Image: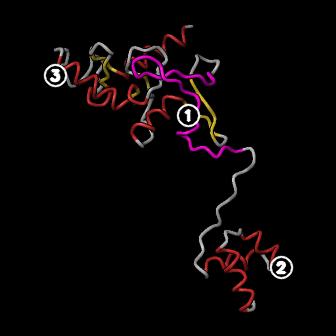
Amino acid sequence: MQIAPATVQALADLFAQGATNKAAVRALGIDKDTAARYRARLGFGPAKQPTPANRSTLTLAEKWQTYVRPVEGDHMEWTGRRRNNGGTMVFTHHSREYTARSVAFYVRTGRKPVGKVTAECEYPGCVAPQCVEDDPGRTRSRGQYAAVVGLATPLTECTNGHSTAEHRRYDRDGRPYCAACHAATDARRKAAA
């Protein structure tokens, strides 16, 4: 559908003011396909959608911050909701559930964590960004500790043949273990219960 130059100008003005295609359709009496086509022709990207009334204007990090409280020694305590299945600290942001520690990790690093995020300090339930680590970071730092205290091992496989390059993890005290064997033991224990 071709539209008059005056309508094109009115459409450009509306788009410049942030109007959606739907608003342009209502204001100018054109169809939605024409509005979309002219939005692209005129070089306007998608209109910013208004924040729904029930949706928070806070960023993910800002919302996380509303649920933490600083405590002694630069640690942080979670004041928000916990899941019933074990007390995992969680909150909802824009209809999606997040764990407190995964967001703390994101706050510190600017990236999503890989695997489970745990606190590496001794403060119970700590969610301070500087105290949490994801699987690769935890394995790396605990591996360095194991080397310092003399617990590192040159083995390339565990006793069950799992590659240590892929499956080696470390306890807090630096003792190495096989994650694959650990998972298999957990599965057997849960099946027996």
Q: CA distance from mark 3 to mark 2?
A: 75 Å
Q: Quadrant of the N terminus?
A: bottom right
Q: Quadrant of residue 130?
A: top left
Q: In x, y percent, where is residue 193?
A: 57, 7
The residue at 58%/32% (across/down) is 66
Query: Is tag 2's residue or tag 1's residue first in the polypeptide sequence?
Result: 2
Q: Secondary structure at mark 3?
A: loop
Q: Is residue 42 above or below residue 110?
A: below
Question: To which residue does mark 3 refer?
Answer: 154
Q: Are marks 2 and 1 in contact (CB under 8 Å)?
A: no
Q: Is residue 149 above or below residue 156?
A: above
Dot 3: few (<14), some (14–19), or many (≥20) neighbours within 10 Å? few
Q: Which mark is residue 29?
A: 2
Residue type indicated by callout 3: Pro
Query: Is tag 3's residue or tag 1's residue first in the polypeptide sequence?
Result: 1
Q: Secondary structure at mark 2?
A: loop
Question: To which residue does mark 1 refer?
Answer: 64
User: Going by the image, does 131 lie left or right of 53?
Assistant: left
* Magenta stretch holds residue 117: no
* Closer to us: 77 or 100: 77
User: Going by the image, does 17 lie left or right of 155?
Assistant: right
The residue at 23%/20% (across/down) is 145
Q: In x, y percent, where is residue 164?
A: 26, 26
Query: Is tag 3's residue or tag 2's residue first in the polypeptide sequence?
Result: 2
Residue type indicated by callout 1: Trp
The part of the chain drawn in magenta is 55-82
Q: Is residue 51 above or below residue 125?
A: below
Question: Given this view, does label 3 or label 1 mark the residue nearer the observer?
Answer: 1
Q: In x, y percent, where is residue 54?
A: 74, 44
Residue type indicated by callout 2: Gly
* Magenta stretch holds residue 69: yes
